[in-house]
Image (tube, rainbow, N blue to C red):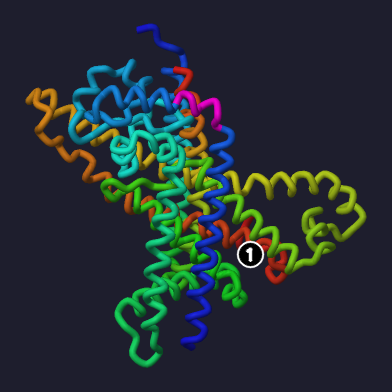
Amino acid sequence: MPEMSRNKLATFALVFGALFFAAGIAGAQHDGHGHDQGTAHTEQVQDADGHAGQNQAEDHAEEALAGHQHDMDAHEAHGDGHGEEHGGSMPHLPNLLVFMAGWFPDAAHFLHEWTNPIYAFIVVILVSIFFINLRSSLSARKPSRTQMATELVLGGLYGLFQQIIGPTARRYTPYLGSLFLFILLNNLFGLVPLGHAATSAFNTTTFALGALTFFVVQGIALKENGIGGYLHHMAGSPKTGMDWGFSILLFPLHLLGELIKPISLALRLFGNIFGEDTLVATMVLLGAGITYGLTGSDFVPGIPLQFPFYFLGLLSSTIQALVFTLLATVYIALWLPHGDHGEEHGH
Amino acid sequence: MDGNILGLALPIGLGMAAIGSGLGLGKAIEGGMNAMGRQPEAIGQIQTAMIIGCAFIEALTIYALIATILLMGNL
């Protein structure tokens, strides 16, 4: 039993590394694509420097739009329009890297471009350290509290996958479980002060997760069905001559469906987490704006209007992590031969 | 204020999407709750299926939200 848990943990660590790697590659690609934006960013950084560290990274688009808001959030709630290509005027809470960009202006561009991979990396390192530390103290006779809590989480996840996939769920638990932990911790990181949810960016994190899931699902499908079975399934599992005729129509439909799945997964996660973060940031701005309007002083903290939304954030972070994982599980289950098109899971 | 028609269209469109998926979510959760009340021993399975269904319904609002975010640059 201890050997099995150790294997499980080792696989977790490996899959975490793969997740981070995918996120990094996607980030690098984004970096390559964003050359024309690069100039805009450096401009923005210079602009921010001009503000002498008072408002580190303010987007000038927002500056032009809402010059008065600028002063409202001067001390604690910088509405740094960080949302690169999705809407330049989205409020976003400052994270640690924004402050670091203020301290090290040379690295500001790099930090801005790589915010999401860096935060994903921080999460991966934290979780890896946790599991590696836990590994040395694993014991079947006398489990520690941490071990029991971890086993509770892993067992719960395994039970959930078993409900959907069936007895072979054991094989897929490492990937799906680490997907869940990675997404959940990244989502929760967005609620931590000075933290940033790496999952609130489509092109650096969530698309990488979706693409990784796509390749995993296709790999499992090919392995479980074989090439012939795979193509047969893609053609809508034809049996009679009529079915074979329709399979010409069904094949592109299934192909399109397979390609859309990861994008819809990624968009759902991104939209939810980005929306949630924006909501919290908007409420912070509102609270700071109210106190500024009442007192006219920069040194009065804002009303914590965002507080109730943290609970909403906790809820939606957990649900979105669960939904991403469950949908990936269902996509795997749909490809497994046993359920025969998974009538009970629906399409 | 030289506003763009998008300024009116985006919130209304998002609101309409929210109405639709709100109705859909209400119906899905109603069905799930009824099923749970009728068969409490199957709560786990019903919940899983319900959450997956809710995710698909909710995705429509999220698409509207993303379209809004993308188009906000044109405001």
What amino acid is labelled 1 in the image? Ala
Foreground residue, A303 or B27?
A303
Reply above or below: A233 against A264: below
Residue A285 placement (x, y as % from top left): 24, 31
Residue lying at the far left in this picture: please name it. A295
Q: Is residue A230 visible?
A: yes
Residue A328 placement (x, y as % from top left): 57, 58
SS for tag 1? helix
**Image mark 1: chain:** A
Residue at image mark 1: A333
Q: Is residue A343 visible?
A: no
Foreground residue, A235 or A105?
A105
Read off the magenta span. Answer: A34-40
Could you tell me what secondary structure mostly forms the magenta stretch?
A: helix
Residue at left offset 45%, top offset 42%: A114
Q: Check residue A293 for magenta coloring.
A: no
Residue lying at the far top in this picture: please name it. B2
Residue A123 placement (x, y as % from top left): 40, 57
Residue lying at the far right in this picture: please name it. A241
Residue at left offset 46%, top offset 48%: A117
